[in-house]
Amino acid sequence: MPITFEITRSQRLLRQYYELRHTYFKRDLGIEDFDGFEDEGDRNGKILIAHRAGEVIAGARISTSEGMLRQVREFDLAPDRCCMWERLVISPEERNLEVGRDFTSAMIDVSLNLGYRHAMVLSTLRISRLYRLCHAGLGIEFEIKRAAPECVSPAFAELDHYISLAHIHQRDPVRPVMGRANTGAWPAMVATA
């Protein structure tokens, strides 16, 4: 069954995404008191979900870089042209390179359509490396810039954090998504702060 990628306001789909996020952030990241349900960032951002016939299998939040202006300036970016990708979660049954690359491709397309040229990610080093792998398959540069302990919110204080930058403006609209075959398992930890 094909996967549909969409920005949604559907309460039914959002509830499924929040439940998935709540469950797997707690399990995969070991944050027992994590509350993955709707928050202010969700209400102010765009929620991209992937679903099969209405069953959510992945999701992420695309938001402005407003809370990261110091880092935007550090990387010499225009604040209104740089977004944040946050709260990515993929259902364990769907964790493979095909779904990872397709979801990454959808985040890039949506972000470009919203007028962004770059996307920043704040995540663990392991997740940053997974993002880099998916971007490499799409021919887009993804830089793991540096450790970023100053950016960690209290809920994620026990995790290492790195700030990374995707150069989504490099997107070649005619380049096909690579990795159509399930070429390997997506590691267990795919929840990102």
Image (tube, rainbow, N blue to C red):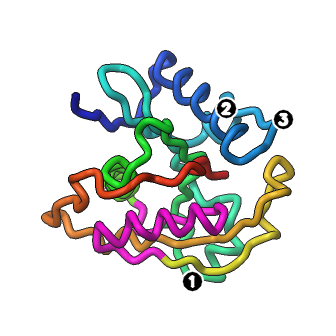
Where in the figure is residue 166, as x and y percent of width and height? 46, 70
Instruction: Answer few, some or many: residues within 10 Å of disc 3's Cα (few below 14, many 20 plus, some between 14 and 19).
Output: few
Camera sees residue 172: yes
Residue at 46% in and 26% down: 9
Q: Is residue 5 magenta?
A: no
**Left of 27 or right of it: where is 166?**
left
Residue occupying the far left of the picture = 174
Q: Compare residues 142 and 61 and report the one nearer the observer.
A: 142
- Separation (CA) of disc 1 from disc 2: 34 Å
Q: Amino acid at mark 3?
A: Asp
- Separation (CA) of disc 3 from disc 1: 36 Å
Q: Is residue 124 above or below residue 22?
A: below
Element at badge 2? helix
Instruction: Answer few, some or many: residues within 10 Å of disc 2's Cα (few below 14, many 20 plus, some between 14 and 19).
Output: many
Where in the figure is residue 55, as x and y percent of width and height? 40, 22
Give the labeled residue for mark 2.
Answer: 22
Q: Is residue 57 above or below residue 116?
A: above
**Left of 30 or right of it: where is 38?**
left
Q: On the rendered image, what quadrant is the N terminus found in?
A: top left
Instruction: In the rendered structure, find residue 33 and report the number of the disc placed on it.
Output: 3
Residue occupying the far front of the picture = 184
Residue occupying the far top of the picture = 12
- Separation (CA) of disc 3 from disc 2: 10 Å
Q: Amino acid at mark 1?
A: Asp
Boundaries of the magenta span: 116-142
Camera sees residue 104: no
Give the labeled residue for mark 1.
Answer: 76
Instruction: In the rendered structure, find residue 110 and report the number of the disc placed on it.
Output: none
Q: Amino acid at mark 2?
A: His
Residue at 56% in and 49% down: 188
